[in-house]
Amino acid sequence: MTSVLEANSIEIGYHSSLVSPFDIKLRKGSLVALLGPNGSGKTSLIKTLAGIIPPYSGMVKFLGKDLKDFSLLEKSHGITTVFMNQSIHPQIKVKDYVSLGRSPYSNFLDARRETDLKIVNQALEETRTLHFEDRFLSTLSDGERSRVFLARALAQEVQVLFLDEPFAFLDIPNTVYLFNLLKKLTQETGLSILLSTHQLHYVKDYCDEVIAFDGRNKVFQKSVEDAFEGELLAWTKDFEAFL
């Protein structure tokens, strides 16, 4: 598969590096799980790959070009990130919030094109949030809100989607539904998704590859099978016993 985004000899961190230099690739149409112990650097890696913070060293490339050479608008056409702990305006309604995903293309709030409306409605339908489109985002449960965050990202129609703990607040039926949805999107649209999660059993069932912090300051990228058969995820063994 074609590489959409890659990191070459990068280190991540703010005032010092959290890990040894590593290389990774995110291929077109792949669903990749980001695993690691709490505090190992998963969120920092997502922010680095998305161009929110610069790498401590090394280079991140998107479509073969250094990510730092893209303008903010150019990046918003190709990459988006969903953080579950993001702040929200208390008086914004669900559909208006999801509509913000169209802003990079059409200044959506000022010019409501029919195409944009269809894309927004589709994103709401796919995430099962259409039935509360007129509710204020602040009145939703954490699980409902996380689905709305995802809907906004889908409405943005990017090539690379980063999700930071997207299933943290979801019940089992919605977790299964959204894993199926993400898998379908990668297969049918070519969207590349990197998601951080602790849902190891779902990773085995749905993901194509694993990027993992080994708990010893190193990062590896492997197939799901190789990641779980080796010692890369040794830090999860006690946890797996409870699954």
Image (cartoon, rainbow, N blue to C red):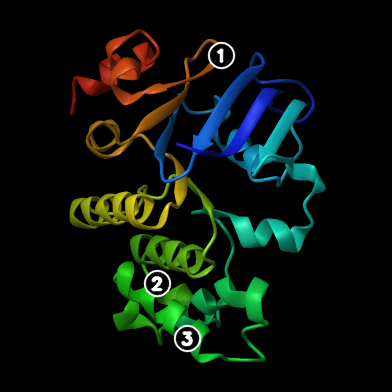
Report which residue position mark 3 lands on.
117
Q: Is residue 141 above or below residue 207?
A: below
Q: Is residue 1 above or below residue 107?
A: above
Q: CA distance from mark 1 to mark 2?
A: 36 Å
Q: Which mark is residue 218?
A: 1
Tell me: 91 left or right of 120.
right
Give the residue type at disc 2.
Ala
Tell me: 217 left or right of 30.
right
Q: Quadrant of residue 185?
A: bottom left
Provide residue 130's location: percent of width, then percent of height: 33, 80
Q: Are marks 3 and 1 in contact (CB under 8 Å)?
A: no
Specify which label sits upstream in the sequence, 1 or 2.
Answer: 2
Q: Quadrant of the C terminus?
A: top left
Q: Is 218 in front, or is 138?
A: 218
Provide residue 78's location: percent of width, then percent of height: 61, 56
Q: Which mark is residue 123?
A: 2
Specify which label sits upstream in the sequence, 2 or 3.
Answer: 3
Give the residue type at disc 3.
Leu
Provide residue 179's location: percent of width, then percent of height: 28, 49
Q: Is 25 in front, or is 165?
A: 25
Q: CA distance from mark 3 to mark 1?
A: 44 Å
Residue at 58%, 75% in the rendered image: 102
Q: Is 234 in front, or is 62?
A: 62
- Under circle 1, the secondary element is loop
Residue at 73%, 41% in the rendered image: 65
